[in-house]
Image (tube, rainbow, N blue to C red):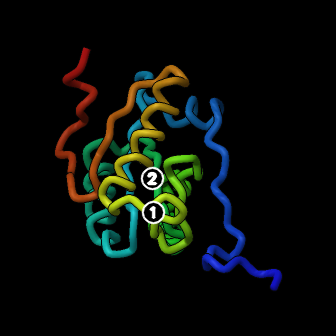
Amino acid sequence: GTGSDDGSSGVEPEVVDGELLRKLARKKTIFMMMVDSTEFLDFGTNSLCHFWKAIPDASILVWTLQVPVLNWCRKVMPKATCRLIPRSEYCQYNATGAPTGKTLRHFKFVTYCKMEMFVYVLTAGYNVFWMDADAILLKDPLKFLP
């Protein structure tokens, strides 16, 4: 058939290039979080609402492994920049977020994917401020850093 068997509906990760990183940066820092599956949407919503309450003018890059989470992020959190994590040797997945190819336990798998995003942003010359989806900010953390 012509359709994809992983349920991704042909959705491929979009490029996160230097121009996008410049747009998102605040004091040479990129705020990032990952909502890796639909079971964490409530956590992600709560975390992002507190993020913008603490830092109303800030941008955040939200990574995901699932097309439904990508769609949620773009619809419910239009202020966020939402992207599927690019597939790589260590970060292979399908639209449901389940690892494919190399069989790693989910936690390790997600950790590898996160690390690749850290390395990508750090290599581009930016700092990373990572927020887990179940964490909230009460104040702008950059005010406390040199």
Dot 1: few (<14), some (14–19), or many (≥20) neighbours within 10 Å?
A: some
Image x and y of residue 131, in percent: 29, 46
Identify which residue is drawn at 33% across, 50% down.
Answer: 52
User: Between residues 124 and 138, which one lies in front from this camera angle?
Assistant: 124
Identify which residue is drawn at 25% across, 54% down.
Answer: 50
Identify which residue is drawn at 22% across, 58% down.
Answer: 134
In the picture, which quadrant includes the C terminus?
top left
Q: Quadrant of residue 115?
A: top left
Drawn side of residue 135 relative to residue 71, left or right: left
Identify which residue is drawn at 47% across, 40% down.
Answer: 117
Could you tell me if the residues under marks 1 and 2 are in contact, i.e. CB atoms within 8 Å? Answer: yes
Residue annotated with mark 1: 77
Residue annotated with mark 2: 62
Image x and y of residue 122, in percent: 46, 26
Task: Identify the mark nearer the N-term, 1 or 2.
Answer: 2
Q: Which residue, as the protein is rendered here, is positioned at the far bottom?
A: 1
Q: Quadrant of residue 103?
A: bottom left
Dot 2: few (<14), some (14–19), or many (≥20) neighbours within 10 Å?
A: many
46 is higher (above) or lower (below) than 55: below
Q: CA distance from mark 1 to mark 2?
A: 10 Å
Image x and y of residue 125, in percent: 50, 20
Q: Looking at numbered disc 2 in the image, what kind of residue is underneath it?
A: Val
Select label 1 or label 2 by which is in front. 2
In the picture, which quadrant includes the N terminus?
bottom right
Residue 95: which disc? none
